[in-house]
Amino acid sequence: MAPTPAARDVAIVAFAQSDHRRRTDELSEVELLMPVLHQVLDATGLKTSDIGFTCSGSSDYLAGRAFSFTMALDGVGAWPPISESHVEMDGAWALYEAWVKILTGEADTALVYGYGKSSPGEVRDVLTRQLDPYYVAPLWPDSVALAALQAQALIDAGETDEPALAAVAARSRDAASANSHAQVRGSRPQGDYVVHPLRTGDCPPIGDGAAAVILAAGDRARELCARPAWIRGMDHRIEAHGLGVRDLTDSPSTRLAGERAGAFELPVDTAELHAPFTSQEIVLRKALRLGDDVAVNPSGGALAANPVMAAGLVRLGEAAARIHRGESDRALAHATSGPCLQQNLVAVLEGES
Amino acid sequence: MAGSAGPEVLRAPLVVEFPFTRSLGPVQSAFLTGLRERTVLGVRTGDGRVLVPPVEYDPVTAEEIRDLVEVGATGTVTTWAWNPAPRRDQPLDRPFAWVLVQLDGADTALLHALDAPGPEAVHSGMRVRVRWAAERTGAITDIACFEPGEPGETDEPGGTREAGGEPAAHSGRFDDPVTGIVAAARLDYTYSPGRAQSAYINGLSARRTVGERCPSCRKVYVPPRGACPTCGVATEERVEVGPAGTVTTYCIVNIKAKNLDIEVPYVYAHIALDGAGLALHGRIGGIPYDQVRMGLRVEPVWSEGGRYPDHYRPTGEPDADYETYKELI
Ligand SMILES: [Zn+2]
């Protein structure tokens, strides 16, 4: 399927994120988020009143706070009323909505943010509430258990083994040594099985964090950023919710989203993959045909910091920041949602030489 | 982002329970009723595949599918994961394997638990059979779990599939069909309100109402949420307000709330405490409900051991002039 050409040039012009930490008891969600919003606005010199559209991603279930996203808006300065939207999803999908908003010409700039506080609850249990309520949720299969079923399927298929998974963990956390925002910096022992075949090292850290980006169109982007990260294509696709209906060793939704985003037209030099579990990187590399010459998760990825509802947006932000810094010319960014890579978003970003 | 976790950080347990009552479609109803009767049903898609658990719509074509078939209560593990530490609501309270099981006659797999002695006893491709729950209500938990079973073992009573043959059609009709489920769920949290609200609550425990002033527009927020929603900046300057205030608007409550021991009718009001930039709300007492009015001057009444004012009562001062509080309505 041919990629859909973008109707307008839109770029990520700024990215900011919090230091991701195991607990942030002293901070409410807006207190966690607000400094990140200020950083990303300061980077462009924009004020809230200059922003054409604001879109956020979060989930009330994480911290158990009803309508927390409306409280989070306090940090934006939403009065007089702004043009605003929210998705109960990772902020990457908020970015997608904002991108579409700009493509339609209804806005020239957008502020996108995502945040999550997993520390107040048990995120493994919380995430069971997103599953099929008739056949699956009553069994409370936690997020690690479902990822472990996928990992075992990959091992049975000969696509990976425990040493290969350990290597993914070690490479990611070594890379995070250079990322001051990461929660787990530097390699650590793989540890015991959490749910066999996944060990502690194969699983993401649990923690709190926030991220924000600013999008801008055309010349506005060039004014706001020396080297904008142009979104050449972006698409997201979802698979059947029944785990037993899917081939867990593959990710056709990622591949299709990648095709639609133009990921296969030219090679990328960087890929920021949202793979909270080591085994999921194996699936994504295959689906996206990433060779060893591609720098995968130079930020450390979700294995180094996994603020749920922000970690996908962080992938887009990290890929864009690498282009901003001149360290990448063409980068792929991926975000996922749901169990076992159920839903996937792929974006292709480019810098101008 | 520094913010140190000082002694003033408050924490409290928070339990969120949400018992969703969900209605079932015809296929789901037949499947769950079938489990109650120890019969496993699947649904056939347009291209002939048998989905177990069955769904109302084809996951590929979205076509409505209604052709039910009966599959075996035995099957084959397609993938598994050993769970050494079961969590509260999971199917078994001792270590077990999560499994995807392709039941005999099905083309897709069902997620459930497998009762096995240890991970060395589990592998993909192993044969398993349903262990039925003793009490069955028409729910996925009517399958208590799977247990290891040898190939060629006969199905539990009710299975009509011939070995190697096509699963037989089933009408999906049972006496007293299940038409809905109640999905109880409980999540446990440790709530911490953050810097601004912790300071507010700590102030209240000393019977002081402490708001925060916006450094930009100077408005004083009570209770503070940590940010000025107009300016989008942190509010950090603490300002004690009240204790007295002015009723800016009110309503008369005529319906008794569950678990609330207050005689109706009573007045619930917006009260602008002196020095506050917006009104908070509270109950008005110490005055007949039909004599409460906008502009009434009130003060908090603290109950013994209470962490916030129980209600507000008239101070006896003359009413406030409308001009003094109209911006706070
Ligand atoms: Zn203000």
Image (cartoon, grey):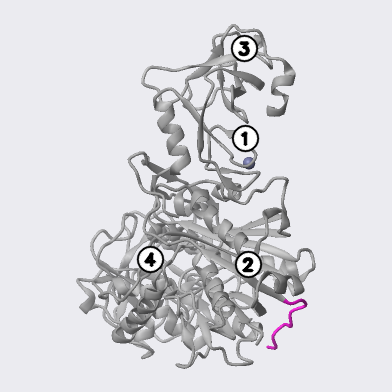
Q: Is residue B78 visible?
A: no
Q: Indicate which label's residue lies in the foreground, 1 or 4.
A: 1
Mark 1 lies on a secondary structure that is loop
**Left or right: B19, with A42 as reference point:** left
Q: CA distance from mark 1 to mark 4?
A: 37 Å
Q: Are marks 2 and 4 on the same chain?
A: yes
Q: Is residue A178 visible?
A: yes
Which mark identifies residue B289? Answer: 3
Query: Which residue position holds label 1?
Result: B219
User: Is label 2 in contact with label 3 (beta carbons under 8 Å)?
Assistant: no
Where residue A311 sits in the image (x, y, percent)? 49, 67
Highlighted range, magenta:
A1-9
Nearest the camera: A326 or B249? A326
Mark whose residue sits in front, 3 or 4 = 4
- Position of residue B251 measured from the top left corner of the image (x, y, whole percent): 65, 22
Q: Looking at the image, in which quadrant does ligand 1 appear? A: top right
Cα–Cα gap, marks 2 and 3: 51 Å
Q: CA distance from mark 1 to mark 2?
A: 33 Å
> Residue A154 location in percent, x, y?
38, 84
Residue drawn at x 76%, y 64% as measured from the top left: A107
Q: If you read the primary sequence from the N terminus, does the residue marked by circle 2 or circle 4 appear first?
A: 2
| Amino acid residing under circle 4 | Gln
